Amino acid sequence: MAVYTHVSAEALSRFLARYDVGELVSAKGIAEGVENSNYLVDTTVGRYILTLYERRVAAGDLPFFMALLDHLAAKGLPVPPAIADREGQAIQQLEGRPACLIRFLPGVSLSHPTPAQALAAGEALAQMHRAVGDFALSRPNTMGVDTWRPLFERCGRSLDAIAPGLHDALDRALDHVLAAWPRDTLDACAIHADLFPDNVLMRGDRVSGLIDFYFACTDVRVFDLAITHSAWSFDASGSRYDAAIGDALFAGYERHFPLSPAERDAFPTLAAGACLRFALSRAWDWLNTPADALVTRKDPLAYLRRLAHYAPDLLPDHMKNHA
Ligand SMILES: Nc1ncnc2c1ncn2[C@@H]1O[C@H](COP(=O)(O)OP(=O)(O)OP(=O)(O)O)[C@@H](O)[C@H]1O
Ligand SMILES: N[C@@H](CCO)C(=O)O
């Protein structure tokens, strides 16, 4: 579950008094998510999400995230902007953490998307990329290509405790992907960088919300499609590729933003990079989160298996078997 910071009813009532949002009726911690503490807050006026930023979200990055959400909301994208208090402040402090009160969006987080939902998500991602064409701010990708080798080195030989041979397999795959990475040749823009199914709210086959922009950054545009493709098109173990989902995601995206030949050529490298990015962040968390912590650790090997799909030649046979 993800409630790292407990907020008392008294502290929450005092917090809400800064806003024109009525009075607290109820608040409950939201179990989903691993990064931040989230509460579902009902007041006499409406429903909100309270997020306290933990771990990977730096307070100094919040103005970028909030400006991006405001920009996208103003363009009609279904994203949840943070609400400003009476003094115009959206970014606050609560229980010693940076915190925002966020508009609640209807819909359900997906765990098993259908092709029709993947098509809609692909469209929404492309519409987001169209909408940031005139977004002026930028933020480096703190989980971008140049961070993977240092993160790998920090994990070190402990990787083999996750699976024997994992260290050398990732080392080799990193060498290949970093050498092939398209540097300064493809269009870049503000990207979501973590558009997993659980970050898309749906009502039926319609996207009602794109949430969790806390890895958003400036990076290669089609890398965002590659991240989304790798997150959506496999079962949870990463061993079974679902071509109907992958194709639908692509088709939805290309309805609004057709890929150039160079982007198409680079796609397998970008997708392999996406696999390394999540294999490494999950491996780091796996090695540094006690097995009995309240947060469920995500399986790094599920991304090694995806890597075997996009770049079968990069993994030695014994690792493929492992995978
Ligand atoms: N604006 C919103 N409207 C409705 N529900 C929301 C909203 N924001 C978050 N949620 C709910 O809270 C859950 C957790 O939110 P979120 O994914 O942002 O958390 P996180 O800790 O940052 O997670 P992650 O592990 O995906 O990075 C979501 O799955 C969704 O159910
Ligand atoms: N989406 C990430 C978790 C943090 O956003 C993962 O599944 O590894």
Image (cartoon, rainbow, N blue to C red):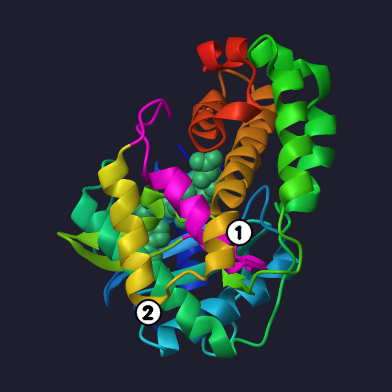
Q: Earlier in the sequence, mark 1 or mark 2?
A: 2
Q: Residue at x 49, y 33 (%)?
A: 306
Q: Residue at x 50, y 27 (%)?
A: 305
In this view of the protein, can residue 7 be seen by the observer? Answer: no
Q: Which residues are magenta?
A: 212-241
In the rendered image of this protein, does residue 44 appear above or below residue 7?
Answer: below
State the mark number for residue 241. none
State the mark number for residue 215. 1
Mark 2 residue type: Leu
Mark 1 residue type: Phe
In the rendered image of this protein, does residue 297 appear above or below residue 108?
Answer: above
Along the line of sight, the residue nearer the viewer: 80 or 177: 177
Q: Position of residue 159 (x, y in %)?
A: 72, 19
The residue indicated by pointer 2 is 77
State which quarter of the image contains the N terminus: top left
Q: Quadrant of residue 64?
A: bottom right
Cβ–Cβ under 8 Å for marks 1 and 2: no
74 relative to 292 in the view: left or right: left
Q: Position of residue 195 (x, y in %)?
A: 46, 56
Q: CA distance from mark 1 to mark 2?
A: 18 Å
Q: Residues within 10 Å of mark 2 (few under 14, many from 20)?
A: many
Whether the residue under disc 1 has CB within 8 Å of ligand 2:
yes
Q: Position of residue 63 (x, y in %)?
A: 66, 76
> Please, what secondary structure does the residue beneath circle 2 have?
loop
Q: Residues within 10 Å of mark 1 (few under 14, many from 20)?
A: some
